[in-house]
Amino acid sequence: MLLGRAASERIDELERAAVLVAEEGYGPGYVEIFGRVAALFPADADRAIFAVNAVLSAAAAPLVFALGRALGLEGARALVAAALVAADPVSVRFGATEAYFPPIIALTLGAALALVVAARRAEAGRWGAALSLAAAGALLSAQAARVHPVAWGPVALGPMFVLAGALAKKEPGRGRWLRAGGGAAAAAVVVGLGVGGGGGGGGGGGGGGGGGGTSGGWIAAVSGRVGAHYQAGEGLTALLHPRAVAVLFLVAAVLLVLARPRAIALPALASLAALVATRDAYAQSDLWRASYDRLYMAAPLLALAAMLPARLSFLGAPSKAMAFAGALSLAVLVQGAPVIRGRTTEQLEHGFFRDAFAGLPPGCRVAYVQRVGKRVLRLPEYAIRAESGGPRNAVEVGSSADVLALRAGGGCLRYARTSLCTSADGRGMCEGIERGLLLSPAAAASFPARPSYDELPYDRDTVDVGLFEVSAAAGEP
């Protein structure tokens, strides 16, 4: 499908953005997935991305169900695990946002499922289907790895599901372990080739190469920045802490006694161990940590479902199983309602400026402070209606002189006071700019101080934001 000029320009902007985010440790995969979506809906890019992310988040539940069945779980048990995923409050919370967790979870679950089924097809001698599914698993793994470094752990765990799937088959003798180990090793090689050789969609995602090169090249380039957040020694220390060791041994003992099939314990324990070793690598906020946990929760939830007592009546009746899963989902959603309804200051601010920008005349420019120290803020600039061939709608400024220079060029101009101005880092610059201008309020709002990043707090309980018309320099008639 051919895109219009505006959409093509939007794709070019997203490609440049991909290079910038790669410099900060992000991969090009996010822009490859969502670039064309944003380009197709330039005036509603955020809502289009939210909608696609909601679909990806919703896909996690059926993928968990299918993965459970592929690993040998009964339908009712797999349905319980899927119900817990579908109703998880944290997943619902980040589902319809711009978060990178939904695509990573969907991609890694899809990759694990493809690899497990590929191993089954290979055992049956259906090599064409096996190779196709293995290639799909490798490409999905590569794409997930290109989104953000937090995906590397879940991607690496994919072969563990292959091992569990092979061991779940009831076969006598030691040959079962050799075949299972060989299948897992083959899956690891396939994933390694996929991630190291490239994958990640070239021009298909609307982001072109988006920061380019193969996945392996990008991973090598960004590994140094990951080291600034995470040291392997610290992860090993956390994993070997007596409390962590005791908990993992206890979980292993319970799984081996109660889980059916027992092999599900392998990816579950590996996931929990990887989570313990990496959970505090970034630590942006409690909600972010809870979201990070969801990257590793599929196998533990399947193991939990595998431990349900066989005497439960609903396990043998599909209608009862569905009723139980529905009631369980509802109970989890009700319990997690406060998490689902919660909003950070930045989320509320985004909605305010989106609506305020939509009411500006075409070609109007907005000046605001975009970065101070570690703080970086980007407003929904795409909501400002642009004039064809006109200047950029949003302009970064650092002084009142910058704003006055924009005003001298004529046309509509607004100054945005953002949440960044309600911080010890940004207040001085914002107040300095505003002292040098004569401002007339056009829209304003106040929000509770709920930062999305714990290390970048606000120093007041209320955050005031607003949009102002720039009339003149302060002191001018």
Image (tube, rainbow, N blue to C red):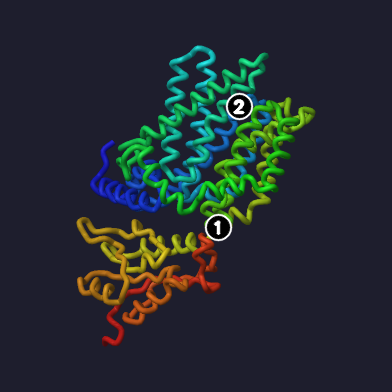
Query: Residue visible at 28% across and 73% down?
Result: 403
Indicate the secondary structure of the residue bearing disc 1.
loop
User: x, y (%) of residue 96?
Assistant: 50, 48
- For the residues labelled 1 and 2, the Cα–Cα distance comes to 33 Å
Question: What amino acid is found at the position of numbered circle 2 in the picture?
Answer: Ala
Query: Residue visible at 23% across and 61% down?
Result: 391
Query: Residue visible at 57% across and 58% down?
Result: 342
**Depicted 165 relative to depicted 147: above or below:** above
User: x, y (%) of residue 188?
Assistant: 49, 29
User: x, y (%) of residue 454?
Assistant: 54, 62
Residue matched to label 2 = 164
Kindly indicate the quadrant of the structure image that contains residue 393.
bottom left
Residue matched to label 1 = 285
Q: Which residue is nearer to you in this view: 59 or 69? A: 69
**Depicted 83 relative to depicted 69: above or below:** below
Quarter containing the C terminus: bottom left
Q: Are marks 1 and 2 in contact (CB under 8 Å)?
A: no
Residue 187 appears in the figure: yes
**Depicted 265 relative to depicted 223: above or below:** above
Query: Residue visible at 32% across and 71% down?
Result: 398
Q: Which residue is nearer to you in this view: 115 or 81? A: 115
Residue 444 appears in the figure: no
Crowd rating for badge 1 (residues with CA inside 10 Å; few <14, some 14–19, many 20+): some
User: x, y (%) of residue 53?
Assistant: 47, 44
**Depicted 397 relative to depicted 67: above or below:** below
Question: What amino acid is found at the position of numbered circle 1 in the picture?
Answer: Ser
Indicate the secondary structure of the residue bearing disc 2.
helix
